[in-house]
Image (cartoon, helix red, strand yellow):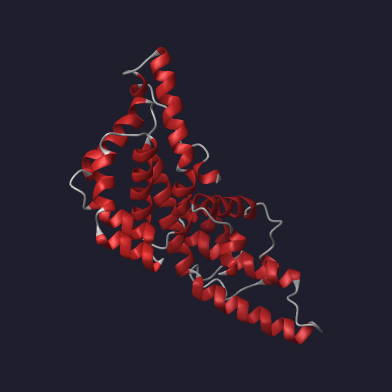
Amino acid sequence: MSAIAGNIVLTQAGLASLSGDALRRAEEEFTDAFNQNRALLAGFSKAENALDLACVRDGFHLGMAKALHLPSYKPVEDHIVHDFRVAAAAAAGTNVFETQVAVARQAPGWKVMVGEVMRKAAVVGSDLAGIWKTLAVGRLEWLSATSAAHGLKLILKDALKIDAAKHSEDGALLEGDLSDARMVWMYALGTQLPPCKELATAWAAVACVEKPLEPLHGYNEDLWDPRRPEWAPLDLAIQAAAERAGTSLDEAWSL
């Protein structure tokens, strides 16, 4: 996933404690462990709230400790293995990952294990805390924006269905109408996404949006022309926000 493609970030401070072959081996081991857990980290894209994100983060820490063969992982693993809740979840086939993470957090050696993972990361210059902050902020900003614009999206979709029923023999949506509707919805997302707000304000001036949070109020189709130069920067910024959240505009529109 492109949102985590550049995730092993090197810093000079982290490289100071090792050098030469020892550093190269440490980097290779860490990169291999990271790649083993890349799919787990990508689970952030399915998170629906901060609690879900924290579960993915801590599951990643657990997976990294295991892949790195850290001594501090063993006590946590033993705690998981001997907790009846994990066995019960496995038998039921539900919430196994979430249960494992919840139980691991309660292990006496949990904080020690996480600390060791972070130290290993620092040695090779990988800013795990920064990586995670970027992923979490991007996802939470997107969830907030899509939630705020959800009502508008439903209104637009209903209007599309009505127009299609009136003007299309097979009831299929008209491509031009769909593009117009998605444009309004994207603008609404832009008003809520921090990295996009200034661009959304610029577009509102061009399209003479009377009420930024109600773009259909006073809507003038002629002014909402995607060929206007002010639209492309907003369009690209919103697409980038979707990518940071681990999703796409097509997927978000379909929900």
Q: Does the image show residue 206?
A: no
Please name the residue shown 62% across and 77% down the image. 157
Rendered view: 193 above or below 34: below
Residue 179 in percent (x, y) is at: 69, 66
Who is closer to the viewer here, 250 or 145?
250
Q: Quadrant of residue 165?
A: bottom right
Query: From this viewpoint, is residue 200 visible?
Result: yes
Q: In this view of the protein, which residue sits in the foreground, 172 or 97?
A: 97
The image position of residue 178, as x and y in percent, is 69, 70
Vertical side of 125 occupied by 133: above or below: below
Front residue of 167 and 107? 107
Horizontal arrangement in the rendering, residue 51 relative to residue 229 (left or right): left
Compared across the picture, whether 228 is left or right of 130 comes to: right
Would you identify the image quadrant in which residue 132 lies?
top left
- Residue extending farthest to the top is 20
Q: Nearer the viewer, residue 112 or 100?
A: 100
Residue at 75% in and 74% down: 174
Name the residue rendered at 49%, 61% in the picture.
191
Residue 156 to residue 196: above or below: below
Residue plotted at (45% across, 43% down): 37
Image quarter hosting the C terminus: bottom right
| Residue 240 position within the rendered picture, expressed as x and y whole percent measured from the top left | 55, 50
**231 relative to 71 in the view: left or right:** right
Residue 246: image x %, image y %?
51, 53
